[in-house]
Image (cartoon, grey):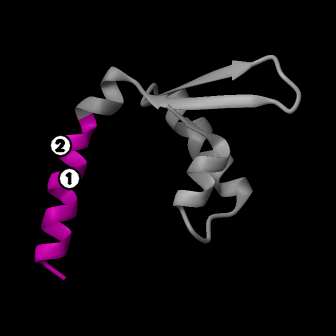
């Protein structure tokens, strides 16, 4: 599980708006899950769903293909 701030730090140059849009898209399509905690300040954690985990080999293969064909 990763918190929002951790995700933002791992993606240099991404705007908050874009990161929020992408996270919402991934949640909507059930690739990641979002868990909110009723705290102040708000705490939210994201994690891969089973469907998201199943896409990792495909993404790895696409990345390998891209690197081999630059």
Element type where label 1 sits in the image: helix
Q: Are marks 1 and 2 in contact (CB under 8 Å)?
A: yes
In this picture, residue 40 sits left or right of residue 58: right
Instruction: Give the total of numbered labels.
Output: 2
Residue 24 in the figure: left or right of residue 33: right
Query: Who's the residue at 32% across and 25% down the image?
Result: 51
x, y percent for residue 69: 13, 78
The percent position of residue 64, horizontal first and vertical second, equals 15, 64
> Looking at this rendering, what residue extends furthest in the right direction?
40
> Dot 1 corresponds to which residue?
60
Residue 15 x/y as whole percent: 69, 63
Hey, which residue is sitting farthest top in the picture?
38
What residue is drawn where x is 55% and y is 32%?
46
Asked which quadrant contains residue 4, the reply is top right
Q: Residues within 10 Å of mark 2 (few under 14, many from 20)?
A: few
**Bounds of the magenta segment:** 55-70
Residue 46, above or below 35: below
Q: Residue at x 53, y 62 (%)?
A: 11
Badge number at residue 57:
2
| Above or below: residue 32 compared with residue 21 | above
Q: Quadrant of residue 42?
A: top right
Mark 1 and mark 2: Cα distance apart in space? 5 Å
Q: Which mark is residue 41?
A: none
Give left or right: position of 15 versus 57: right
Callout 1: 10 Å neighbours few (<14), some, many (20+)?
A: few
Q: Main secondary structure of the magenta part?
A: helix
User: Please, is residue 30 above or below residue 69 in the view?
Assistant: above
């Amino acid at each position: 599980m990763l918190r929002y701030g951790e995700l933002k730090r791992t993606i240099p140059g991404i705007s908050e708006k874009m990161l929020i849009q992408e996270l919402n898209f991934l949640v909507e399509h059930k690739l990641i899950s979002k868990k909110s905690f009723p705290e102040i300040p708000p705490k939210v954690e994201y994690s891969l769903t089973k469907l998201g985990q199943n896409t990792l080999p495909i993404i790895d293969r696409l990345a390998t293909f891209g690197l081999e064909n630059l």
